[in-house]
Image: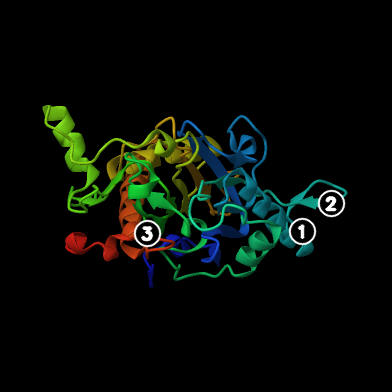
Amino acid sequence: MSERNDDLCDVPGILVGHDTDLEAGTGCTVIRCAWPALGAVDVRGGAPGTRETDLLDPRCTMTEVHAVVLTGGSAFGLAAADGVMRALAEEGVGFDAGPARVPIVPAAVLFDLGVGRADVRPDAASGMRALRAATGGPIAQGTVGAGTGATVGKMAGPALAVKGGVGSASEQLPDGHVIGVLVAVNALGDIYDAETGRLLAGARSTSGQRWLADDIAAARSGAQPQTPPPAPDQAPVPGTQTTLAVIATDASFTKAELAKLAQMAHNGLALAIRPVHTPFDGDVIFALSTARDAATAAPAGALPLALAGATAALTLARAVAKAIRAATGLHGVPALRDIPFAHNR
């Protein structure tokens, strides 16, 4: 790789565009494939919101993905994929189904209706704008696109949350291929820097001087927590927190191998978000190969796949930390950079 932005667009054939509505506190992100990619998915959260993910099952025959949509707006936001499909169809991009070309656009949503306006959500026009804004990087990160209204650290309720957002990173494999990730972090749990083990962001105590993780440690030791439990009307609701990610590589992997790659990448979320994959989260990871022969290539084998999966997990964990550090406060939800005692994190 001659030049590297340390983001998903370092993978050949990947373009990324955002549509951001700061006033409404929502948006969407489109990962566009410059040519058809092979795709798979792994869903771990207990309350996902998705579209066209069944096609990515290795038991299904579809071997083309033309774009992936990550979006806010809860289930309403799935409408953004309509605009992406419409714009791609206008360009003649899609699976050749005979009478028409049908763009294959898997999508997943996160819940951001508690930030900004709940009555404004990404729609077809939003998805179309994000697709048309897609470029080869560098990728804007933080409070943009699908991460516009994202928040983290909600174990004590949304009133004490910290701002989440979009993060992206990449690594080069020993054989010269690239692993890139993009993540929209909207988690119930606290966020850790996997490289240092330090807590980055979590629920604030009512005094503003402690993170919730201190309270978890206190509870385990039998001490009195510093942060009170959330009021009944502020308790977490299933489906209202979700971390969404796309893993991409230019290495040739079969559809089944990509499914394993996505599965292994979830380890990166476990390194960076605690707790994760809860009944309240809808965590979803897509995996794409932009290798032009991916749909017909022989399996890469266990060792290359294991190395790629481990790299994807570590890169995803780093991207989660980048999202939190890049985020800016919005609609009364402070970002890490806004909290005085957290500046050294």
Amino acid type at circle 2 is Ala
Give the mark nearer the N terminus: 1 vs 3. 1
Distance of mark 3 from mark 2, alpha carbons? 36 Å
Q: Is residue 203 left or right of residue 91?
A: left
Vertical comparison of 258 with 292: above or below = above
Vertical comparison of 218 with 39: above or below = above
Q: Quarter holding the C terminus?
A: bottom left
- Secondary-structure class at tag 3: strand
- Circle 3 is placed at which residue position? 169
Closest to the observer, 212 or 184: 212
- For residue 89, the mark is 1
Across and down, in percent, residue 172 comes to 35, 58
Amino acid type at circle 3 is Ala
Please name which of the two marks, 3 or 2, marks the residue nearer to the observer: 3
Distance of mark 1 from mark 3, alpha carbons? 30 Å
Residue 66 visible at all: yes
Across and down, in percent, residue 294 comes to 56, 47
Distance of mark 1 from mark 2, alpha carbons? 9 Å
Vertical comparison of 232 with 329: above or below = above
- Secondary-structure class at tag 1: helix
Q: Are marks 3 and 2 in contact (CB under 8 Å)?
A: no
- For residue 100, the mark is 2
Residue at 58% across / 67% down in the picture?
134
Residue at 34% across / 37% down in the picture?
230
Across and down, in percent, residue 148 comes to 48, 60
Residue 299 visible at all: no
Residue at 42% across / 63% down in the picture?
330
Q: Are marks 1 and 2 in contact (CB under 8 Å)?
A: yes
Closest to the observer, 34 or 303: 34
Amino acid type at circle 1 is Ala
